[in-house]
Each structure stands twice: as structure tokens, then as C-alpha cells.
Image (spheres, rainbow, N blue to C red):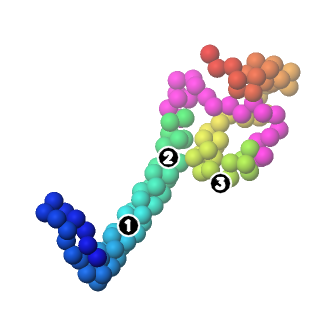
Amino acid sequence: MSTTNTQGPVEISAEVAASVIRQLTQQVSQLELELGGEAQRLAEHVVQAVPEILKALRLHGLVLMNTNPGHAADLEQSLSNRPAALAALDQAWNLDRAPLEPAVIEQVRVAFNGGNYRR
């Protein structure tokens, strides 16, 4: 096998080439393993950070609220494979459980328009 450098062609044996490829393959595998670990740590950090962020916002009167009638269990099920979203859902207010008259709850639902009114 030959390759070219700035001084011209260089001959390397198949054995050396195979050794280099093995070493590079091992390095790539190690980097992929490290990247996977970093991704896992980041995901865990996000799951821990989301509730803290929402709690801090709540101190300033900003709340996450589920205005969808009667669908809290469905929402939880649909988010079951998204830990960060479940962490946020744990901090959300559920309008269905608000200490308000049913007519007032419905007025709030209409006013929020499914969360589409955000001024």
C-alpha cells in the first residue's frame, strides 16, 4: 500500500495499515462510549433542572398549567418516554383540580385557548 506525503509516495505494509485501522476503530469506540455517557449525564441534568426552573418562575407568579379537560393521565402516558417533559408535568397546575366553580374553570379554559394566548 502506498500513500503520498509532502516528500512523495510512502510505502506502508498491510500489517501497519491494519494496525492503524484497529487503533482508530478502538479510539472511535471509546469516544462513542464517552459521548453516550455525556448524553446520559446531560439528560439527567435536564430532568433535575426543569423542576427547579419552573419553581423559580413560580416564585414570580409564572406557572405552567394544563388546561386540557380530563386528559392529565393521557398526557402523562404520552410523555412517559420523555423524562424532562414528565418532570415539567409534575410541576404543572392542573386546571381540573383548581378550587374554582366549574363555570369559572371553563371560562379560564376559553381564555387560555389551549395555551395559545401568550402575551
110 vs 29, left or right, is right
Task: Identify the residue at the far front of this view.
Answer: 8
Instruction: Judge whether 9 appears above or below 114 on screen.
Output: below
* Residue indicated by mark 3: 81
Q: Which amino acid type is marked by label 3? A: Asn
Residue 4, quarter of the rendered image: bottom left
Q: Residue furthest top?
A: 119
Residue sitting farthest toward the left: 7
Q: Which mark is residue 46?
A: 2
Task: Tell me whether the residue at label 2 lies in contact with that at label 1, contact meaning CB atoms closer than 8 angstroms.
Answer: no
Q: Earlier in the sequence, mark 2 or mark 1?
A: 1
- Where residue 52 appears, x then y in whole percent? 50, 39
Q: Secondary structure at mark 2?
A: helix
* 46 inside magenta stretch: no
SS class of the residue under badge 3?
A: loop
User: Would residue 43 appear left or right of 14 to someone viewing this image?
Assistant: right
Residue range (magenta): 55-74
Q: Position of residue 84 (x, y in %)?
A: 57, 47
Q: Which residue is mark 1?
A: 28
Q: Nearer the viewer, residue 48 or 113?
A: 113
Per the model, the C-alpha gap separating discs 2 and 3 is: 14 Å
Label 1 SS:
helix
Q: Amino acid at mark 1?
A: Val
The reply to whether residue 86 is in sight is yes
- Residue 108 visible at all: no
Residue type highlighted by circle 2: Val
Pinpoint residue 81: horizontal percent, then vertical percent.
Answer: 65, 54
